[in-house]
Image (spheres, rainbow, N blue to C red):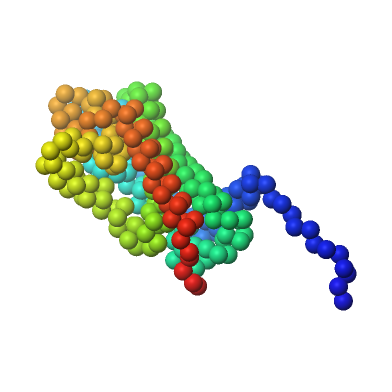
Amino acid sequence: MTSGVATVPVTVRPADAFRRACRYEWRHLAALRSTWILLSVVTVLSVLTGITVLLDLDKQHTVSAVTVADAIAWTPLSLQIPALCFFVLVLGTGPVSTDLVSGAARTTWLTVNGRATAYGAKCAVGFTIGAGTAAVSALLGAVSCAASLAMAGAPQPNWTEVLAPAARFVVWMGCWALLCLAAVALLRSRIVPVLLLVLWPLLGERITGALLGYIPGLDGVNNWLPFAAGRAMLTDVSAYSGDEKPFAQALVGSHLSTSVAVTVFCLYTAAITAAGWWAYCQRDAKAP
C-alpha cells in the first residue's frame, strides 16, 4: 500500500555536484591498495635523493643549485621526463580506464550527475594528485639533500635558485596527470596510452622533430613540440655553466625560454584535456 505522498526530485547545484564528484573520485583512489603502495615507494625514493646528490660533488666538494633542482625533480634532464611520471602514470590512467574499459562509466555518470561533471572531477583530482605528489616529493628530496650535504660537510647550494625549478616541476606533474587521463579518454584503452606516453617523449617526438625539419618552412618546429617545451620548462639551460651548457641544450632539444615553455606546455595540456573531455562526453562506454 502506497502512502500517496509524491517524491519531489531534489535539484543539485552544479557546484555541489562537482564537489561530490571530486569526493567520489578521491574515495575511489584512496580505497585502492595500489595507490598507497605507489605513494609509499615515491616517499622512500624521495628520501633517498640526498644520496644521489652526494655522488655529484665536484673536486671542491660543492654541488650546484641546478644539480639539486634536477635531482629533486627526478632527473628530467637525463631521462627526458621526470622518473616520477612512471608512478603517476598508473594513478593518472586508472580513473578513466576503469570507467570506459571496464564498463563502470554508466554507474559513475549516474552517481555524480553527468559525464561532464565526472570528467571535470577526474581532472581536478588527477591534477591535485600529480601536483601534490610532486610537491611533497620535492620537499622531501630537498630536506634529504640538505641533510646529506650537512653530514658530508659540504656547503649548501643557493636554495632560492631551487625554488623556481621545483615549482615548475610541480606544475609539470599536474599537467602530466591531465595528459594521462585525456589520453585514455581519447584512445579508450589503458595499454596503448601508457605505451604512447612512455615512448613519445623519449623517442617519438625526437624522430618527428627531425623529420619535420626536412620540410621547407618547418625548420625549428621541433622547439615547439609538446615535450620539447616540457623539457625546456623543467630545465633552464641558461643556468648551466659554459662547459655544461651545450650538453644540457642537446638533451633538452628546445631553445624556448622557461617562461615561454611553461605557456606552451600548459596550452598543449589544456587542448589535449579538452579533446579528452569531448571524447569522454560523446562516446559511449563499453558494456560491462
Residue 237 lies, in percent from the top left, at 24, 29
Quarter of the image with the N terminus is: bottom right
Residue 269 lies, in percent from the top left, at 38, 42
Picture residue at 26% right of the left edge, 50% below the top = 200
Please tell me which residue lies in front, 104 or 155: 104
Picture residue at 16% right of the left edge, 23% below the top = 242
Please tell me which residue lies in front, 140 or 112: 112
- Report the number of discs: 0
Q: Is residue 172 left or right of residue 253?
A: right
Question: Would you say residue 100 is visible in this rendering?
Answer: yes
Q: Among all residues in the image, which is located at the extreme bottom?
A: 1
Residue 225 lies, in percent from the top left, at 26, 40
Picture residue at 38% right of the left edge, 38% below the top = 267
Image-quadrant location for residue 243: top left
Question: Would you say residue 52 is visible in this rendering?
Answer: no
Residue 148 lies, in percent from the top left, at 35, 35
Please tell me which residue lies in front, 163 or 118: 118
Picture residue at 52% right of the left edge, 48% below the top = 120
Q: Is residue 179 left or right of residue 15?
A: left
